């Protein structure tokens, strides 16, 4: 039974009988095919939610410092399928949490990785999961790869991208979707050059054969080719639907929302609008042909990816229902489009924006934003929004603010510095929204964090000398018993392997991912392979860019708190019928500040909500207080909360098994210095 038919059966029952429904699944990422994260289950109510208790827990024992767990568990016929911090695939008894089987794709792989992975896709007899560049099809009953799928149970995602396979680095952090006999997926690729293209692709669910490809960086003769420099498709990368896809089975259409083009912050090699980057794309699900598109950001220079898959909603216009698509953004806006045509359902305003200050760059002269609904995140940073938590914190923030002269939405990157606000992590982020069809309210948790961006010319001095020579020696010979030689490392490791080791660490070698931006790691890998520094590389490498950013830095005060005034995170209810914000509350706390009486500050938050027909909004998400919350969906009033083993930076799943309703969430933590975890926790009402 599909989720659509299951929900129709449940909706058709009187309320007092819905609670007695024996089994209701959570069969796919986001719960429903429309990505609305909406449930008709009604056993847990506003009146009894305070009685919720832990029904079971499952310890993955896979966590490690800096690990995360973003998996949205799938529940079908009493079995829960999910991924762990080390990307094991697990099947659990959904009533008890007992492990039924486990599949570890890391066996035989010497590389260690820090994964941000959001789970699996279950279809018929198989479980689809991605690991590095592989797409696996596992037997649903045993967890073993199905030999008839691809090559011995897996497909190499590097193939079919019109690039030499040894130069392709690709994975998929979000589960794909199934339409008829097709598994359709986006991808995760490098945000620095060299980068793979972000093609959307469909594979046969039985054989793994590639059925169709949509080129997000258009090839010659394809729509949008003239929005790029000539032959950009050969060297440009990114433009990928990394956050996932949504299917309308009745229309036979699949929708994706893409990210920016690599490199994120400087685009002298991609002058133009860069279609289909930062674009909502509607494709014929059977053929991959474009039906319509809507580009939200032209020539993105701020990493303003569309952060989640579109949510399919039905809104009211002139008293009539309209099938629509709601897309949240990092800038704190909601685009509401007609699902069939892509026409906007609220007015749009065109804004002139500052020109670029970097040599060779040409920013788009205008950007457009929806007039309604109003943004759910503050727009731009001014001195009066800087923190006043303490005089010292304010003085620090003011000094730093004045060191970065470019402020405001669409302020261009520069060598003098730009404060990006809303930041790289939103506004809205990958957890996505939940939608209540009865009220027309869209629920969005939002970050209110400013980020610091500074561009620097690439230096002639090797990155190696600054970061590696102290251990491996200026001559790359290493130190016996302490650090290995790096001479001829390119013959023993691929570029992708070296990139992962530098970013994530291995053995005694620390991770440099927090200290070195991806483009800098690429420069370092190039030096290790060729012996050439960036100045020499520039003479022959078409991916070489004159500027890079200095890293990814949140604007914090000296004690590690945001350098702006609260709220630092919010939870919002947006009326899509009226184009208004129905309610907004601060979301999350810092325990150390709360202990001093400074409460309701909000925090950054990751993972999304689930809304129920009978009035509840379930969400974890908050990074530092490790709370799981239940709110009144009509008012935002907190009805119940509890403390998790680690932050629930994931979207929960709601299901019913043997007449008992459960809510389960992955507690992985690990964001922005928070403690890492590896526990799944399921809640339910006490048995009568």
Image (cartoon, rainbow, N blue to C red):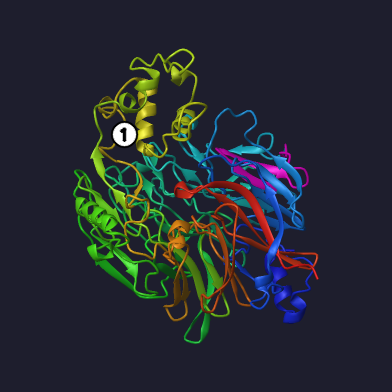
Q: Quadrant of the C terminus?
A: bottom right
Report the side of 629 relative to 656 (left or right): left
Q: Could you say which quadrant of the image residue 208 lies in? A: top right
Report the side of 463 relative to 679 (left or right): left
Task: Tell me the magenta residue range.
Answer: 127-147
Report the side of 37 relative to 54 (left or right): left
At x 39%, y 67%, the residue is 333
In the picture as drawn, the residue positioned furthest to the bottom comes out as 319
At x 72%, y 48%, the residue is 91
Q: Quadrant of the N terminus?
A: bottom right
At x 72%, y 79%, the residue is 12
Q: Is residue 340 above or below residue 235?
A: below
What secondary structure is found at the residue carrying circle 1?
loop
Q: Could you say which quadrant of the image residue 611 lies in? A: bottom right
Magenta residue check for 135: yes
* Residue 641 image point, x, y percent: 59, 66
Is residue 156 something that shows in the picture?
Answer: yes
Identify which residue, 192 or 610, lies in the foreground: 610
Magenta residue check for 253: no
* Residue 633 image point, x, y percent: 55, 75
Is residue 176 something that shows in the picture?
Answer: no
Q: Is residue 618 above or below residue 576?
A: above
Q: Could you say which quadrant of the image residue 369 lies in? A: bottom left
Residue where numbered disc 1 is placed: 542
* Residue 663 image point, x, y percent: 66, 63
């Amino acid at each position: 039974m599909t989720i659509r038919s299951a929900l129709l059966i449940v909706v058709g029952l009187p309320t007092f009988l819905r609670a007695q429904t024996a089994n209701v699944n959570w069969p796919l990422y986001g719960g429903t095919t429309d990505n609305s994260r909406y449930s008709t289950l009604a056993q847990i109510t506003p009146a009894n939610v305070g009685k919720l208790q832990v029904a079971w827990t499952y310890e993955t024992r896979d966590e490690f410092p800096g690990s995360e767990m973003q998996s949205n568990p799938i529940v079908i016929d009493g079995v829960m399928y999910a991924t762990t911090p080390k990307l094991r695939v697990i099947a659990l008894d959904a009533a008890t949490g007992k492990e039924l089987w486990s599949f570890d794709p890391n066996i035989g792989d010497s590389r260690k990785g820090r994964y941000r992975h959001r789970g699996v896709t279950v279809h018929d007899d198989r479980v689809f999961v991605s690991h590095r560049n592989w797409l696996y099809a596992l037997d649903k009953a045993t967890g073993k790869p199905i030999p008839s799928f691809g090559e011995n149970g897996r497909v190499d995602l590097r193939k079919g991208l019109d690039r030499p396979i040894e130069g392709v680095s690709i994975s998929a952090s979000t589960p794909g979707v199934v339409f008829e006999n097709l598994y359709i997926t986006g991808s995760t690729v490098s945000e620095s050059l060299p980068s793979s293209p972000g093609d959307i692709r469909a594979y046969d669910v039985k054989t793994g054969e590639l059925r169709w490809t949509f080129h997000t960086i258009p090839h010659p003769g394809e729509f949008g080719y003239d929005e790029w420099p000539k032959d950009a498709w050969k060297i440009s990368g990114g433009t990928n639907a990394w956050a996932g896809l949504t299917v309308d089975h009745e229309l036979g259409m699949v929708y994706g929302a893409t990210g920016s083009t690599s490199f994120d912050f400087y685009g002298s090699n991609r002058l133009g609008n860069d279609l289909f980057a930062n674009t909502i794309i509607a494709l014929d699900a059977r053929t991959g042909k474009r039906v319509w598109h809507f580009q939200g950001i032209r020539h993105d220079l701020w990493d303003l990816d569309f952060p989640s898959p579109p949510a399919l909603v039905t809104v009211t216009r002139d008293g009539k229902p309209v099938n629509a698509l709601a897309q949240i953004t990092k800038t704190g806006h909601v685009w509401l489009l007609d699902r069939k045509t892509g026409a906007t359902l609220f007015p749009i305003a065109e804004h002139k924006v500052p020109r670029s200050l970097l040599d060779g760059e040409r920013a788009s002269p205008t950007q457009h934003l929806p007039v309604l609904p109003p943004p759910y995140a503050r727009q731009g940073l001014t001195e009066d929004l800087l923190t006043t938590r303490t005089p010292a914190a304010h003085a620090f923030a003011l000094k730093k603010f004045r060191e970065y002269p470019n402020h405001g939405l669409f302020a261009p990157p520069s060598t003098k510095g730009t404060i990006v606000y809303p930041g790289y992590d939103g506004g809205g982020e990958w957890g996505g929204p939940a939608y209540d069809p009865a009220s027309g309210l869209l629920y969005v948790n939002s970050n209110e964090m400013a980020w610091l961006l500074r561009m620097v010319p690439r230096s002639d001095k090797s990155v190696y000398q600054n970061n590696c020579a102290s251990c491996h020696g200026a001559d790359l010979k290493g130190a016996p018993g302490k650090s290995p030689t790096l001479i001829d490392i390119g013959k023993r490791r691929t570029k992708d392997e070296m990139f992962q080791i530098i970013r994530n660490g291995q053995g005694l070698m620390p991770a440099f991912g927090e200290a070195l931006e991806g483009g800098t790691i690429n420069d370092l890998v190039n030096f290790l392979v060729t012996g050439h520094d960036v100045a020499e590389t520039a003479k022959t490498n078409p991916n070489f860019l004159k500027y890079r950013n200095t890293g990814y830095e949140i604007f914090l005060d000296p004690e590690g708190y945001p350098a702006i005034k609260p709220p630092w995170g919010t939870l919002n209810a947006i009326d899509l019928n009226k184009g208004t914000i129905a309610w907004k509350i601060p979301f999350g706390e810092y325990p150390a500040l709360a202990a001093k009486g400074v409460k309701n500050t909000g925090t950054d938050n990751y993972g999304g909500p689930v809304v129920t027909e009978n009035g509840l909004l379930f969400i974890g998400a908050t990074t530092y207080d490790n709370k799981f919350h239940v709110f009144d969906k009509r008012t935002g009033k907190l009805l119940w909360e509890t403390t998790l083993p680690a932050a629930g930076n994931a979207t929960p799943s709601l299901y019913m098994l043997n007449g008992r309703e459960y809510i389960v969430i992955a507690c992985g933590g690990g964001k922005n210095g928070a403690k890492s975890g590896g526990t799944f926790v399921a809640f339910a009402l006490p048995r009568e």
